[in-house]
Amino acid sequence: MTAQESSPVSAGRGEPLVVLKDVQKHFGQLHALKDIDLTVTRGEVVVVIGPSGSGKSTLCRTINRLETIDSGTIMLDGQPLPEEGKELAALRAEVGMVFQSFNLFAHKTILENVTLGPIKVRGMKKADADKRAMELLERVGIAHQAEKYAAQLSGGQQQRVAIARALAMDPKVMLFDEPTSALDPEMIKEVLDVMVDLAEQGMTMVVVTHEMGFARTAADRVVFMADGAIVEENTPEEFFTNPSSDRAKDFLGKIL
Ligand code: ADP
Ligand code: MG
């Protein structure tokens, strides 16, 4: 197999990649995830929307096992999520995560932020990691700032670096949890543009966002959550023009 064929973004498009079956999660008395069944296929872009507190972040966090689940199963690329140890570290490398807060190391350069994971977790040689990081920084439009410290960049630039950092681990899937919610309005587009570009290149993505423009243009499917459950799943066209549930109608009425 050539590198191109084995690339996670080009091979096996349409096969199930992330599969959640009957996932339940409680925080004490609170039933945070209820009977979650969700399959994300390779190359698919799933946008998760829903009111605050509906379980969107918890859903993302269970997929890279930042949260445990009470019951049900989560499979990534045909394997159940590992419980702990090296396997769990390997899983985390395969699931890229971009949060609202970028969490870059402020005292390290942009380049160091992106190469840290590949060197420490993947055991990549520094020269190789640097080369790959520069390609990714080029892709997100930050290559010329590679030697700056994270704190010297704008929020939008830092978030693009955070995306490059996640991509540097060659993830099978990228999870975005409200990646533009902490940004000033003028910086939102530069981050969404990078995400649209990623989607067009075939990256499998689960995106929690309130950016309905992104959902309309980039999503293959919209998943609407309320009170810990998936209430509705549909194409963006159907979801936005003809939502079937009252919860979704109510939500869309408030935000559109
Ligand atoms: P969303 O991302 O859709 O706003 P969350 O997944 O963050 O929702 O939260 C879902 C529910 O679970 C909320 O009621 C929230 O308060 C609760 N919750 C989330 N994380 C925890 C936690 N670590 N401990 C207790 N409750 C939590
Ligand atoms: Mg959230």
Image (cartoon, helix red, strand yellow):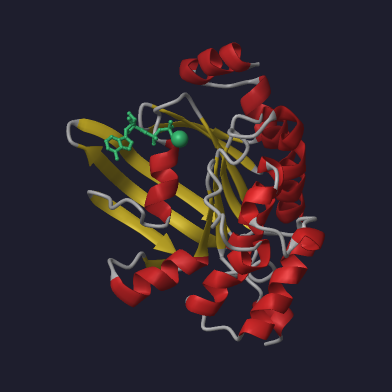
- 158 relative position to 96: left or right: right
The residue sitting at 63% across, 37% down in the picture is: 180
Q: Quadrant of ligand 2?
A: top left
120 to 219, vertically: above or below:
below
183 to 119, vertically: above or below:
above
The residue sitting at 77% across, 59% down in the picture is: 145
| Residue 208 in view in this figure | yes
Residue 4 in picture, x, y percent from top left? 73, 78
Quarter in which the N terminus is drawn: bottom right
Q: Of 187 and 152, which appears nearest the observer?
A: 152
Quarter in which the C terminus is drawn: top right
Farthest residue to the left: give it.
29
Q: Of 184 and 170, which appears nearest the observer?
A: 184
Residue 156 in picture, x, y percent from top left? 70, 43
Residue 171 in picture, x, y percent from top left? 56, 66
- 80 relative position to 172: left or right: left
Task: Count numbered badges in the picture.
Answer: 0
Q: Of 44 and 85, which appears nearest the observer?
A: 85
Residue 104 in picture, x, y percent from top left? 56, 54
Image quadrant assignment for residue 74 = bottom left
The residue sitting at 43% across, 40% down in the picture is: 57
| Residue 219 in view in this figure | no
